[in-house]
Amino acid sequence: MSTGRCRLRAKEYRPLAWYLCLLIALFVAGCVNYGFGANDATVYYVPLGRETYMAKTIEDFEAQAYERGKITDRDVRQVIRLIGESTATRKFGSNRVRVKIVRRHASDIYLDNDGGVLIDGEEKAIDEAAVKKIKKLIERNIR
């Protein structure tokens, strides 16, 4: 009779095991889709300050970029903060693009070689100190 009881107990716990497996699967799926690294952005990069023979434009920048990498959401927020704090005035040079940050749920950010910025369809500019900070931040993430 003792073996019958063990089988009965195993059958009682079988639904609990299925529920546990289902919960674990849902948790893992949630982490993959919405969690760890889901808000990272892709960066296409030609080193800031480097002159090129061919114009690097918005339309074909992804194909012509020298490097490609990931940048964390925290670093993207820092780039946006640096852009917002800057008081420089300059037009965005659409033939001298050096950085393209592709964000998952927002518009792309473009930086030209002279510190001109195109973000959310609006032209802005950043000063030399902000350009150096952004360059350091991007190169740290790419390499």
Image: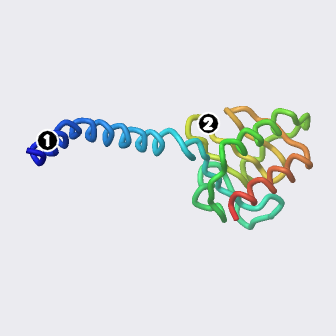
Q: Nearer the viewer, residue 39 or 32?
A: 32
Residue that protrudes farthest toward the front in the picture: 1
Please tell me which of labels 1 and 2 falls first in the chain: 1
Task: Name the residue: 70% across, 65% down.
Answer: 143
Q: Residues within 10 Å of mark 1 (few under 14, many from 20)?
A: few
Q: Secondary structure at mark 2?
A: loop
* Amino acid type indicated by mark 2: Ser
131 left or right of 74 in image: right
Instruction: Give the foreground label among 1 and 2.
Output: 1
Q: Are marks 1 and 2 in contact (CB under 8 Å)?
A: no
Colouring chosen for the image of the structure: rainbow
Task: Name the residue: 67% across, 32% down.
Answer: 120
Q: Nearer the viewer, residue 95 or 119?
A: 119
User: Where residue 77 sits in the image (x, y, percent)?
Assistant: 73, 38
User: Where residue 48 sits in the image (x, y, percent)?
Assistant: 80, 58
Q: Which residue is mark 1?
A: 5
49 left or right of 26 in image: right
Q: Which residue is mark 2?
A: 107
* Amino acid type indicated by mark 1: Arg
Task: Name the residue: 62% across, 62% down.
Answer: 64
User: Where residue 27 sits in the image (x, y, percent)?
Assistant: 42, 39
User: Residue 89 falls in which quadrant of the image?
Assistant: top right
> CA gap, disc 1 to disc 2?
63 Å
Q: Residue 55, which numbered label?
A: none
Task: Name the residue: 63% across, 58% down.
Answer: 69
Residue that protrudes farthest toward the bottom in the picture: 53
Q: Residues within 10 Å of mark 2 (few under 14, many from 20)?
A: few
Q: Nearer the viewer, residue 121 or 4?
A: 4
